[in-house]
Each structure stands twice: as structure tokens, then as C-alpha cells.
Image (cartoon, rainbow, N blue to C red):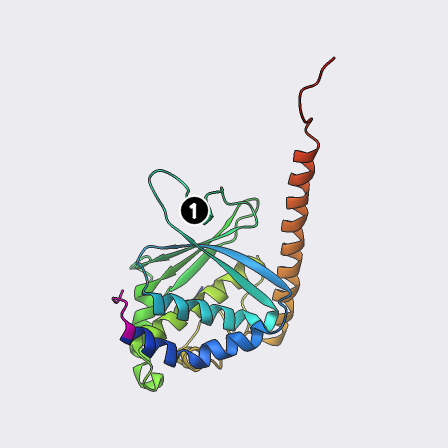
Amino acid sequence: MFDPRVHDSAGILRLAVGLLGVVLGAASLAAEQTPAATVTLRVYDSPHLSQPMSIALRAATEDALAPAGIAIRWLACVARASGLTGPCATTPGRHDVVVRVVASHDRRDPERCGFSLPLTGGPAFVSLARECAARVSRALESAQAGMPVMLGEARILGYTLAHELAHVLLPGRPHSRDGIFAARLDRRHWTGVLSGRLSFLEQDIEQLRTAAVTRQAAVASEARGRVAATDSRPRGILIR
Ligand SMILES: [Zn+2]
């Protein structure tokens, strides 16, 4: 475990884009290399994060996972009473990951900014709590070096998501002694998150890469199986 609404405006957007330069720069450098695997996330955003926050969250997650050669495909999902719509119209399969951004988790455990349920035989679920990330971000104000609390929040959520995705990709593996996959992130870790210096340990990076590649191969194999099953159906009308 470990531990975003402002109105969009051109000013906020310019500010955010400027401040995000370092983050996006790191992500785009990584993007120049072909990723070893891509993980698709179905994201349900209940608190309706602002666009700059969403961009910052995504960049932070991609930044954290890029050393492992993992790219993220983001699907923005909307829950409707009428059922599944848009890019998330299909029922999640066992290799899918559903991410829910919520206002808060259990108030008895305020330190828990994220948790995951890597279910076997079904989709994995990850939950991120905005209020928890905001609290951590405010507590680190002095370490933010002029970075708006909002962007600190987004980076904390993004790295929390990367941590939880490590649980999804490496089910049953215990936490690491340090780095993004440490059991508990203290002030030193979070300061590293804000400055972009916190990373997964080398052994975590290797295991994540292998797990993501294996998972992608399984997804591709299942997709081929579905196509083969469709192709084997008789076409047209049989006349005897
Ligand atoms: Zn954990």
C-alpha cells in the first residue's frame, strides 16, 4: 500500500505545462525508446480531476514505469446508469486493469492513498484517493520548491498508481526495501517523488519488465484465440 478540481483556464494550463516540462521531458525521452510492453488502464475519475492534473498524473505514472519499458494506454471511462459506453464499452477481461480515482478511502486509514486488488481470473482493481494525496502534498509544501500543491498532488497520485500497478503485475511479491515499491513511503520518498528522483529498485525494474511482457503475450494469445474461434464458425447457409 501507499500511500484532483480547479476550473480549466488558459493561465492555469500554461502554468501547468511550464511546470510539467521536467516531468514530460523525462517521459518523452523514455517514449523515444520502443516500450517492451503496454498496459491498458480503464480509468474512472469520480472527483473530475482538472486537465492539468490528469496530464501530470499520467506523466508521473509513465515516468515511473518507463525504466521498465512499460508504456500505458489510458482509457477515460465514464460510469453511466445505462451501462458501459465509449472506450470502456466491453466487459473488462482478466488482463484488464480498472483504476478508480475517488475523493477518499476509509477515514480510519487516512494514510492509505492507494490500494489494489490483483484478482486471479478477473480484472485487477486499483483505487487512488485524492484527499490523501492532497494532504501529503500540503505537508511537503516546503519541499515543493514553488510547485503548486495541485501538481504535487498529481505526482503523488501518479507514483501511487505506479506502486499499485507493481502489485498488479507482480501478484504476491512482497514490497521492496526501498524505492517506489517500498511498503511505506516516508517524507524522503515523497520528496523524491516531487523532484522526480524516486524510482523502482533495479531488481523491481527487471521483474516488472518481464511480468509486463509476459502479460502482453498472454493478452495477444487470448485475442488470437478469440479470432480463431470466430473464424471457425460456419459462414453462410449450409445447403444439404
Ligand atoms: Zn504496496
Which one is in front, 51 or 67? 51
Residue 17 x, y percent position in the rendering: 38, 76
The residue under label 1 is which amino acid type? Gly
Outermost residue toward the right?
Answer: 240
Residue 172 appearing in the image: no
In this picture, residue 58 sits left or right of residue 32 = left
Q: Residue furthest left?
A: 7
- Point out the image quarter for the C terminus: top right
Secondary structure mostly seen in the magenta stretch: loop
Above or below, 59 relative to 43: below
User: Which residue is rendered at x = 40% and y = 68% of the image?
Assistant: 55
Q: Position of residue 228 (x, y in %)?
A: 69, 38
How far across and down, in percent of the image, does residue 202 sit?
62, 76
Q: Determine which quarter of the picture holds residue 133.
A: bottom left
Closer to the camera in the image, 180 or 38: 38
**Callout 1: few (<14), some (14-19), or many (20+) C-alpha neighbours within 10 Å?**
few
Q: Mark yes or no: residue 76 visible.
A: yes
Q: Is residue 7 magenta?
A: yes
In the rendered image, which residue does mark 1 sit on? Answer: 86
Q: Is residue 148 left or right of residue 238?
A: left
Is 77 inside the magenta-drawn segment?
no
Image coordinates for residue 236, horizontal then vertical, percent: 67, 24
The answer to which of 218 and 75 lies nearer the viewer is: 75
Q: Is residue 184 above or below residue 237?
A: below
Residue positioned most to the top:
240
- Tally of marks: 1
Q: Quadrant of the N terminus?
A: bottom left
Residue range of the region highlighted in magenta in the rendering: 5-10
Q: Secondary structure at mark 1?
A: helix
**Residue, x 44% and y 67% (percent of image)?**
58
Classify residue 151 by image quadrant: bottom left
